[in-house]
Amino acid sequence: MGVLEDKAHARLFYKYLSRVYDTINPFIWNDEMRNEALEWFGIDASDRVLDVGCGTGFATEGLLGYTDDVWGLDQSAHQLEKAYAKFGKRGRVKFHRGDAERLPFADDSFDAYWSSGSIEYWPDPVAALREARRVTKPGGPVLIVGPDYPNSTVFQRLADAIMLFYDEAEADRMFAEAGFETFEHRIQQRASGTPRAITTIARVPDDNNAVDPV
């Protein structure tokens, strides 16, 4: 487990990164990549969407171009303060501070679930993906963006020491173990030589209540 997959370490990390996050983020996950993922997400104006690991609200802003019913959740108070400055603490977006592995929402609360740049900090990704499945209505989309596993052995060792990086085979395992039956992975990249993102679009099973979450 990487050092930033510890929740306390991740919160401390974002205490300082939140100050420059919006400056750094476009070099890794930019508008074009976000907008491409939003097209794959396929939501409409009537959908209630949960943005988990919403951070300063970069993806949230994109989601608001499709629906006004957006809920944001993050474990970092410092990241949320940046989001409040953009959208208001009690404005268009309904913000919550919370944990991806223990979402404070009832079953089938949302039509769709989005999480970009958060899974790499989850100590138990499968548990969090089960939570995504639980709070999303049957048939609804679940979109997860995380860091693709590097090809270089040196960078693999560095990545493993910091946080979760994973390839398509590992993504297959995590989503299947979490109870998803239909999903596909796509690789996104800002430019050649820059970090790659692995974006998974899954569907909550129509017979979701019949899927054993254990």
Image (tube, grey):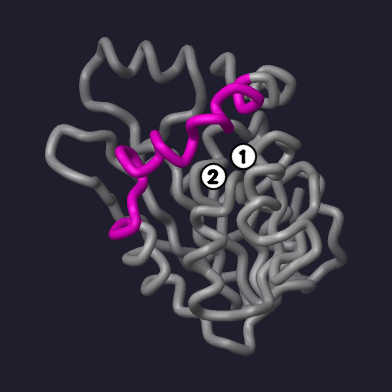
Q: Can residue 127 be seen by looking at this rendering? A: no
**Which picture quadrant has residue 205?**
bottom right
Give the number of the disc on residue 174: 2
The amino acid pointed to by label 2 is Met
Residue at image position (16%, 43%) is 191
Q: Which quadrant would residue 192 be assigned to in this image?
A: top left
- Which one is earlier in the sequence, the residue at label 1 or at label 2? 1
Q: Which segment did they paint magenta? A: 13-33
The tag on residue 125 is: 1
Residue 67, above or below 5: below
Residue at (34, 31) in percent of width and height: 149
Task: Classify 209 as above or below 159.
Answer: below
For this orientation, the residue located farthest to the left is: 192
Residue 195, image x, y percentages: 28, 34
Density class for disc 1 (Cα within 10 Å; few <14, some 14-19, many ≥20) is: many
Q: Examine the structure image and report whether residue 194 is included in the region drawn in magenta.
A: no
Three-letter amino acid code of the residue under disc 1: Pro
Mark 2: few, some, or many residues within 10 Å (few <14, many ≥20)? some
| Labels 1 and 2 touching (C-beta < 8 A) | yes
User: Residue 15 appears at what percent x and percent y?
Assistant: 66, 25
Does residue 25 belong to the magenta stretch? yes
Asked if residue 156 lies left or right of residue 44, the reply is left
